[in-house]
Image (tube, coloured by chain):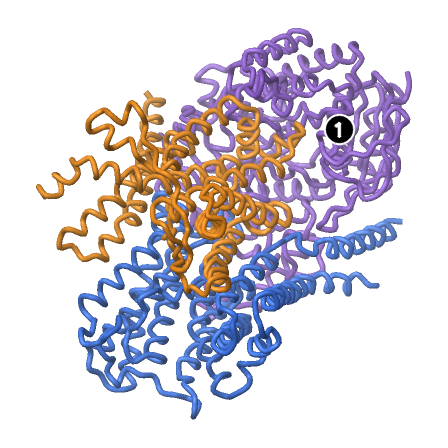
Amino acid sequence: MDLLLSMIFKDAFWFAVIRSTTPILFATLGAVVASRAGAINIGIEGTMLTGALMGVIFSAYTQNVWIGLLAAVLSGILVSMLLGYFALKLRTNIVLTGIAINILAAGGTVFLLAELTGDKGISTSLNSLVLPNVNIPIINSIPVIGNILSGHNILTYVAILCIILMHILFNNMSLGLRIKAVGESPEAAESVGIDVFRIKFIALIISGIFAALGGAFLSMGYVSWFSSGMTAGRGFIALAARAIAGNTSLGSLFASFLFGFADTLSNYLQEFSIPVEFIHMTPYLVTIIGFIVISIINDKKELERKKKQMN
Amino acid sequence: MSSLKLSTKINKYDTLRTVIAILIALIISAIIIFATSETPIYSINNFLFGPIQKLKYFSNVLEMMIPLTFTGLALCIIYQSKHFSLIADGCFFMGAIVASYVAINFTLPKAIHPVVAMIFSGIIGGCIGVLPGILKIKWKANELVTSLMFNYVFYFFGLYIVNYYLRDPEASVFASYRFNKSFALPRILPGTRLHAGFLIAILFIILAYIYIYKTKWGYEIRTVGDNINFAKYSGINTAKVIISSQFIAGAVAGIGGAIEMSGMYKRFLWDVTPSYAWDGVIIALLAKNNPKYVPLAAFFLSYLRIGADMMSRRADVDNEIISIIQAVMILLIAAERFLAYWKQREENKLAKEKYLNAKKEVQ
Amino acid sequence: MSEILKMDKITKIYPGGVVANYQVDFSLQEGEIHALVGENGAGKSTLMKILFGMQKQTEGKIYLRGKEINMNSSQDALELGIGMVHQHFMLVPSLTVAENIVLGHEIKKGIFLDKTRAIEATKELSEKYNLPINPKNKVQDISVSQKQKVEILKALYRGAKILILDEPTAVLTPQEIEELFEQLMLLKKSGHTIIFISHKLHEIKKLCDRLTIMRDGLSVGVHNVNEVSEDDISRLMVGRDVKLEIDKAKAQPKEVLLRVDGINYINDFGKAVVKNVSFSVRKGEIVGIAGVEGNGQSEIIEIITGLKKATKGKVLVHGKEISNLSVREIRELGMAHIPEDRMHTGIAPNMSIEENFISEKYRSEEFSKNGYLLDNKKISDLAKRLIRKFNVKTDSEKTAVKGLSGGNIQKVVVGREFSSDTDLLIVNQPTRGIDVGAIEFIRKMIVKMRDEGNAILLVSADLNEVMTLSDSLIVMNSGEIVGYFPDASKVMEKELGLYMLGVNKQSEEEIRRAVNE
């Protein structure tokens, strides 16, 4: 236990937490935007996977990491357009559409990689690039804090920026207002001439961009290769994190951080004589527990409010 | 045209849509094969006709049908109550693990051994199956999300059991100890690996059909699925219905896992889950959640899988092409508005006719 | 005056195959208030949805100021100066009044929203048209009549010259209706043209200039309001003389069957919606609850039927407390329930008629073989019998319920509930949104059930219905009983209105009489 505590109080641990938080934060923001527009995006997992592969392929072939990132984002947009077209235009059940996207991405990425390179499941023969890490000038020099907050992959800082952008979007921009209206009361939105299809479609595309950024971080930052199923359910965890976040951008940060923490902790636990399977299980168990805890808290709040009203 | 004829035509529309969706999926895969293969005709030939070249290959299709039938049935039952749980994957995987445990550690007579394994697997599968349902009823936790999380949890838990209790240290790859001989299900077709699990699958299809469409419980499940508010208002205990149906679905998936072990394997070898639950989703969709159509859907999917395997072994196209076909099928079959124009036109005709008939009656 | 709008031979067939409009002509003079009348399901709402661009007509043309217009969305309609206030408000509850008003036409400062100017604009508009409202309130916190004002302002903000009001008075008290009429006259004076959808004839006589009558998806006539009598309109609407009064003998109440004792309910938003309500219902009488919708009636019904648990208080059936019983156990005590919203609660739409008939009977020995299997033969026999008895129009008992018309669906619900073994009937909005024939039939059935000795509790938003059917009458306002009338036939509509609005309230003792001690 002492050993564990001493680990937790090291800078490197918290640095790792932030690193693990990044992909889930992107995915959670994606889940929040979709949910605000009244759509549940099950396809985030598959979108992340596609983004991860595209980043690797394009950065390897062009030897330009930014083109790789751009390709990842574009793939996220395309996948979301596919999702949106079927779910919104052809009225395919959105959960089934998401499942189809995930099946397509899980098999399609392996198929594409195999057809392009002959690699089976992992991009060993591709010389793909990694996005740069950034040292933040002033924070950099602060002891402890500098070690934790500075020197992360550029996408980690992009993720933080995205939280702020999301907050502005939903509180100060007409698109955000319309997304909220469409999600909460589509008939009302339609009756004032808002194109519900268009707004939902845009929300899904934003969701897809976030998901793809999360995927790109995994294959071009977290590690430097693509492997099949490397998202390991992060897209699904994001759906749970969204519920815990209560659809707010700040809540997303908190919820993602919780999983980043669980993920890092599980990595550190490998030092102990705990079966490795239980360690791998931790993030998923934390998700389930987090889910339950937040529901109980919400229930209690409800009860308190009722009691107050009675007196 | 009489209105009766027209309305049956509209009912046929759903079938037509399914057929066209399958055709489009196959055409897309043909295009992909032409784009990627150096010997496209040879590839396609293997994909489409490989499974019927030899009895052995065709038997492979039937063998593959067995696990697909069980997960397909499990998802039919789950979706009848409009509960979007994917826990069947965890149930199937844990069913296989539990059966392996029984296969290795129990000594029982030949006919009894697999049956005991199925009972244990069924119970464990059922218990796992209800978990997302309980969380949903108790805390309104979305069953889709929790079931996906539980699938990961049980996958790792299963690996833990194999690694710590069943693993054969002498084996060079990930493998359990050998199963006892008495655990194996008998073969039913000479010269192939087709086993008695095929007959059990047929039995389960019949039982599932009776359960859903002929019993009080099935009535309750369908009522809950169609309109949960109506079910509550009618005095149906919706929580009990959801839990009991999830238990049965989980048990069916768990038994499927046990049968797969005792019919096809001599050791436990899965270091990744076979994920038959995703195929189960497609089967339930193709079968419109009716067990009656599950064999047809399972056969179709199994045929595609074996065909794709043969193609990837003999030619240069990766067998993951199957996932593209599956995704396209899901997207198009579930698309309400796909080919809607045709349906709408027929309906307009029918409605106008009905209206004019009604007018005539009034005058 | 000139013709501002003309709809020419409009036909609308819905994807489900329902013909809602058939070759309907409709025309508007500039600056008039034009009533569109017809029974529920006559096709008024569909015609107006087409005019507002929400639905596309299957056939026919629309002309605005002589020019043909082609609309694909409500956006197009709004741009042409056509606005609509829907029967069910089209507002986003968690947004403020100002945000709701500017939604879709947001005022911006650069790329950002200008919240201050949105609030100012709302204020200006509300003063100009005498529709007082606080722009900063969230819509979920304001009253129904205020929501309606927001809806009207929303249309005006978008420059609507033609304003469609879909049954605007259905949710208002008589006094609020007066206020609305004044505001509408003011709008008329300022040059707006108004389409007023209603089936309340005296309102039309009072407010409107001309009227178009619809029946069964057809337009059956256009008249100047002052040239036709209420009787004429009524006859044209239903196509035959209808008698809305019901023949019923005086009630012979016996012992108390249902007793509601001091119940309170706090809803999910923490609002107390039922406050200390006590009353009882005796065998052989119909007790009616009158009140503007949303004043606690629905919650009381849900508590009595076991769908909700009261926060405080008791409900007794046959002297047995039911607060902790399940819906099934309560039903087994002999309670049947016709729910407020048949589509939401009353049926399983994709299941067959026969399966819908047995939802509270399937457990009984009568319908099962060896305990667990359903006896299909007996079930379809029962279904055939009920279809005949309750006059359900269908080809077969195997048809999915959703394929039936509203009136026939309601007959399925009523048939199921009235055929179960009960002596207590909880009846909520029994005839909402169904055709006249079905209304008459169902009302007669209710009286018949009373005469057979059942205790009946009736809630209806239709004042005429609740006044003619009930033997005694309870009036509710903001979750409380504000009046009790032991003899419903002696109550005047005007008087009832004052209680419903909360202007009048009886003394504790007078209200206490509802308990029948």
Neighbour class for label 1 at 10 Å: few (<14), some, many (≥20)? Answer: many
Q: Please identify which colour was used for chain B in the image.
A: blue
Rendered location of residue B74, percent (x, y): 43, 65
Q: Residue at x 85, y 29 (%)?
A: C232
Q: Residue at x 55, y 23 (%)?
A: C485
Residue type marked 1: Ala
Which chain: orange?
A: A
Determine whether the residue tagged by mark 1 lies in a helix, strand or loop.
helix
Query: Is residue B32 or residue C243 the one in the foreground?
Result: B32
Query: Is residue B34 found left or right of A239 in the rendered image?
Result: right
Rendered location of residue A262, percent (x, y): 26, 43
**Residue identifier under label 1:** C77
Residue B119 location, quadrant: bottom left
Taking B332 as reference, is A42 above or below it? above
Rendered location of residue B93, percent (x, y): 33, 66
Query: Is residue B169 or residue B241 the one in the foreground?
Result: B169
Q: Quadrant of the N terminus of chain B?
A: bottom right
Query: Is residue C87 found left or right of C428 in the rendered image?
Result: right
Q: Chain of mark 1?
A: C
Q: Residue at x 83, y 42 (%)?
A: C11
Query: Is residue C308 found left or right of A149 in the rendered image?
Result: right
Furthest toward the left, the residue is A2
Q: Residue at x 43, y 80 (%)?
A: B198
